[in-house]
């Protein structure tokens, strides 16, 4: 492929990436909050030093912006859209440092299209500030590589690392990367004898101090959950590990994964170069952790995201044949994803050609973004029809946040796995509900009725509320009036 054709191809996909970006912004106003987004938004209404599932940064961000515009979906999401833009800008600058403007532009296009980074890039997840701070740390570390005697670089690195850990506890891997990077260079090893890196580390510890204090006060639940309990099952499984590799090929794209692996081997072959040592130091610790972990327990496909960032910035995307095929794959995947979010494609196809014998609308997970306004108005109606004061409860922590956000009425979660509601002051774990009326809420995705909560007695149905999407059934909500029998 000639140079002119290559440049034309880049312009075409640059335009395509821009169109898809606009489509995502339109979806910001069409899509309701997802389960996890609403859960994190509920953290913002219960501000604390930290939370059970994750450190507090995602809750603090949603809390601040919800107070500016209570009940607005945009107030929950827009800070994370801005942080995603910051991540893209940071990776652009990183690629420009490692290559040139052309490489940086192509890296930006790729990042805009990679499912691993783009699918959740406009949603309120802890991964968004996590990746933004990680990219900031990568940029600062390259500046330190050039001028290690400047204290400002070490302080910025300490701040970025603190924010990474304040987003997700897996951010401690970044500390391992920084240590490996420093010991791999004679010039940087000399910095251990100065105060500069230690001041940066002190700043990191000061930033994560709220997480430490909260865990000490509550018996280290986040640390136990993140580093042990959620990984203490499954056993050794090569089948699961192969499934993990397949998932990485899908969310990163097969060719991008190949290029990332090749970049690793290239860096090993040129390890005498400072930039190669930098690449390996900031990639291998995360790769080692997240590629070994699926052998022994369940995994989430997005956990590997920080491992690829420096490698993606270093890849030469100027190989037109490779990137042309890669970009076509990414464009198709993104279009399918956005189409599923915009329209109930699965239900429409099933209605036209019944391919699945026992199809249910809950099989289309994009339905989880719809029905919030209907559910909220129905919960308000249930509250107005209840003469005595009632508490609202569900067995799913995601639904609790979702119902709370759209109704403006506090909803707690009890049962299933441990969650942040265990530590909220208005939950049945921390205040007496004995003898009180409880409205139990559920939806059709899990069909979990009040029988899942042993403390609920004398339950009677309050009916259901059905939500339709473009004429197709999306989800159904159910409610029961019960009595809370005893303390948990």
Image (tube, helix red, strand yellow):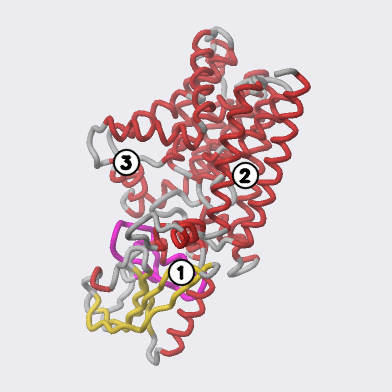
Q: What residue is at 54 percent from the left and 73 percent from the top? A: 373
Image position, residue 325 (x, y; %): 59, 28
- Judging by the rendered image, the residue that carries numbered circle 2 is 84
Q: What residue is at 56 percent from the left and 61 percent from the top? A: 63
> Total marks drawn?
3
Q: CA distance from mark 2 to mark 1?
A: 33 Å
Q: CA distance from mark 2 to mark 3?
A: 27 Å
Which quadrant: the N terminus?
top right
The numbered mark, 1 or 3, whose residue comes first in the sequence reads 3
Q: Which residues are magenta?
A: 400-427
The numbered mark, 2 or 1, whose residue comes first in the sequence reads 2
Task: Tell me which corner region of the image, top left, top right, bottom left or bottom right, holds residue 7.
Answer: top right
Q: Give the number of the mark in front: 1 or 3.
A: 1
Q: What residue is at 37 percent from the left and 79 percent from the top? A: 391
Q: Is residue 405 magenta?
A: yes
The numbered mark, 2 or 3, whose residue comes first in the sequence reads 2
Asked whether residue 43 is in view, the answer is no
Tell me: residue 22, above or below residue 99. below
Image position, residue 132 (x, y; %): 59, 40
Left or right relative to 130: residue 320: right
Q: Give the number of the mark in front: 2 or 1.
A: 1
Label at residue 142: none
Left or right relative to 209: residue 152: right
| Mark 1 burial class by Cα count in 10 Å: few <14, some 14-19, many 20+ | some
- Judging by the rendered image, the residue that carries numbered circle 3 is 298
- Judging by the rendered image, the residue that carries numbered circle 1 is 473
Task: Tell me which corner region of the image, top left, top right, bottom left or bottom right, holds residue 462.
Answer: bottom left
Left or right relative to 360: residue 56: right
């Amino acid at each position: 492929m000639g140079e002119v054709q290559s440049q034309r191809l880049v312009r075409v996909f640059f335009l395509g990436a821009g169109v898809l970006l606009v489509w995502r912004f339109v979806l910001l106003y069409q899509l309701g909050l997802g389960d996890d987004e609403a859960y994190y938004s509920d953290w913002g209404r219960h501000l604390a030093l930290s939370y059970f599932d994750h450190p507090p940064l995602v809750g603090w961000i949603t809390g601040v912006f919800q107070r500016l515009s209570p009940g607005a979906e945009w107030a929950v999401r827009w800070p994370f859209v801005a942080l995603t833009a910051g991540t893209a800008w940071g990776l652009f600058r990183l690629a420009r440092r490692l290559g040139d403007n052309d490489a940086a532009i192509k890296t930006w296009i790729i990042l805009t299209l990679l499912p691993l980074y783009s699918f959740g890039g406009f949603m309120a997840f802890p991964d968004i500030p996590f990746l933004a701070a990680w990219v900031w740390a990568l940029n600062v570390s390259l500046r330190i590589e050039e001028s290690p005697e400047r204290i400002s670089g070490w302080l910025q690195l300490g701040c970025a690392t603190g924010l990474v850990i304040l987003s997700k506890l897996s951010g401690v891997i970044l500390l391992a990367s920084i240590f490996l990077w420093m010991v791999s260079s004679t010039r940087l090893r000399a910095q251990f004898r100065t105060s500069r890196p230690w001041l940066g580390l002190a700043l990191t510890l000061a930033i994560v101090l709220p997480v430490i204090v909260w865990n000490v006060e509550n018996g280290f639940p986040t640390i136990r959950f993140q580093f042990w309990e959620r990984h203490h099952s499954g056993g050794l499984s090569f089948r699961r590990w192969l499934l993990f590799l397949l998932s990485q090929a899908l969310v990163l794209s097969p060719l991008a994964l190949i290029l990332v692996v090749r970049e690793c081997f290239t860096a090993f072959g040129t390890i005498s170069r400072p930039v190669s040592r930098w690449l390996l130091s900031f990639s291998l610790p995360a790769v080692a952790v997240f590629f070994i972990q699926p052998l022994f327990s369940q995994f989430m496909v997005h956990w590997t995201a920080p491992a690829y960032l420096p490698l993606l910035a270093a890849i030469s995307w100027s190989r037109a044949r490779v990137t042309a095929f890669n970009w076509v794959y990414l464009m198709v995947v993104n279009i399918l994803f956005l189409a599923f979010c915009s329209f109930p494609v699965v239900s429409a196809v099933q209605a036209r050609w019944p391919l699945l014998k026992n199809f249910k609308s809950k099989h289309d997970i994009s339905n989880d973004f719809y029905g919030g306004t209907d559910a909220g108005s129905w919960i308000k109606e249930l509250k107005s029809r209840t003469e005595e004061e009632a508490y609202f409860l569900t067995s799913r922590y995601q639904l609790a946040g979702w119902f709370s956000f759209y109704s403006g009425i506090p909803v707690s979660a009890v049962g299933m796995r441990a969650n942040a509601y265990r530590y909220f002051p208005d939950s049945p774990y921390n205040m007496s509900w004995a003898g009180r009326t409880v409205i139990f809420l559920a939806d059709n995705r899990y069909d979990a009725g009040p029988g899942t909560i042993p403390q609920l007695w004398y339950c009677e149905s309050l009916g259901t509320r059905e939500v339709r999407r473009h004429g197709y059934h999306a989800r159904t909500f159910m409610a029961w009036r019960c009595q809370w029998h005893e303390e948990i």
